[in-house]
Image (spheres, helix red, strand yellow):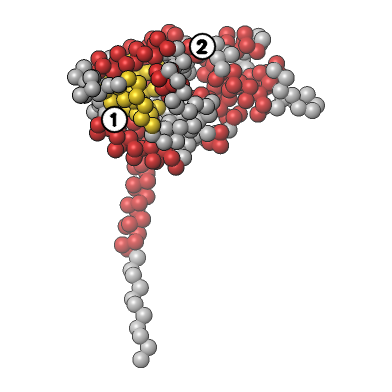
Amino acid sequence: MAIQWFPGHMHLTRKAIEDRIKEIDVVIELLDARLPGSSANPMLAQLTGHKPALKVLNKQDLADPERTALWLDHYNALPGVRALALDASTVAPARALVAACHALAPLRGGMAKPMRVLICGIPNVGKSTLINTLKGKRAAKTGDEAGVTKAEQRIAIADDFYLYDTPGVLWPRIIVAQSGYHLAASGAVGRNAYNDEEVALELLDTLRSHYPQSLQVRYKLGDIAALRSEQLLEAVGRKRGALQSGGTVDTNKAAEILIHDFRSAALGRITLETPQEFAQWLAQGQQRDAERQAKKDAMEQARLVRLKKIPRPDPPVPAS
């Protein structure tokens, strides 16, 4: 099942970004260091592509440091882009953002030309926590759920540095299937948009391939190579006491446990994708999307042809 989530306020956010971007000097996009490719919003790239960009891999303390290094190299190789990784709640690294913004827009600064920065990203990626850290007080509302911020806020980080915070925004249609599952696992989409068991099974596929030891240690499992994902989810549930009457495993509860353990880093520091993997998924998604659009266009063309072949009925003759 494809995972999609685009509440009404996200349409308003898109319009707000379109209006605001004209007067912005630097765009900060917060990414989830555990899924940097999947948490990079292609809609934001379209709206802000001509502006200098700072890619911030947030929650680095939860991510695999070796894979984080790969993603930093990937983004820093792009023109007009700088990237760094941090934990949004740590003061010193967060303040490095200010210096990075000045490096990207060296002609801005001072009271006559204050720096104007737009900060954006997917829901629940940590923008509000970062803003509060930069400001040194609770300037933005935070919460462990998607979609806490609902309206744009302007926050003065310094006398000559203004930060415009936008609500977390996804994009209208996710064409990379893996991204949908990774976003759901991270908590970036609303609970009504996905099935816990389905997301957990996809998560187990990734963990078994790249982090089998994390599963074995956390759930005290033996060799898991021969287990299907469904069997592995049952094993997780049995080890963690997610049992129903009669001793059967409550797989939905087991799924919730697994997802929670991933989000809290109880499984260890994990990154679900590499730049190379995501590039491959994206190419496949774009191909499928192009095929879908071509099929849709062909069906519409056939419909128009049929309409032209069907003679319109003559208008009724008025009774004399």
Question: Upstream in the sequence, badge 2 or badge 1?
Answer: 1
Is residue 154 positioned above or below 268 on the image? below
Residue type for callout 1: Thr
The quadrant of the rendering that contains the C terminus is bottom left
Name the residue located 29 percent from the left edge and 38 percent from the top edge. 19
**Is 279 left or right of 204, judged from the image as shown?**
left
Q: Position of residue 188 (x, y in %)?
A: 49, 28
Name the residue located 35 percent from the left edge and 21 percent from the top edge. 157
Residue type for callout 2: Arg
Name the residue located 31 percent from the left edge and 62 percent from the top edge. 308
- Residue in front for this viewpoint, 282 or 311: 282
Name the residue located 36 percent from the left edge and 41 percent from the top edge. 293
Q: Nearer the viewer, mark 2 or mark 1?
A: 1
Q: Position of residue 316 (x, y in %)?
A: 36, 80
Mark number, residue 269: 2
- The image shows a total of numbered marks equal to 2
Is residue 113 positioned above or below 194 on the image? above
**Is 253 left or right of 40, judged from the image as shown?**
right
Q: Position of residue 141 (x, y in %)?
A: 48, 28
Q: Secondary structure at mark 1?
A: helix
Q: Position of residue 223 (x, y in %)?
A: 63, 9
**Is 175 left or right of 75, judged from the image as shown?**
right
Mark number, residue 279: none
User: For the residue carrying disc 2, how many other residues have a C-alpha within 10 Å: few (<14), some (14-19), or many (20+)?
Assistant: some
**Is 48 left or right of 269, judged from the image as shown?**
left
Measure the C-alpha gap from mark 2 to mark 1. Answer: 31 Å
Mark number, residue 48: 1
The quadrant holding residue 216 is: top right
Residue 256 in view in this figure: yes
Q: Residue furthest bottom?
A: 320
User: For the residue carrying disc 1, how many other residues have a C-alpha within 10 Å: few (<14), some (14-19), or many (20+)?
Assistant: many
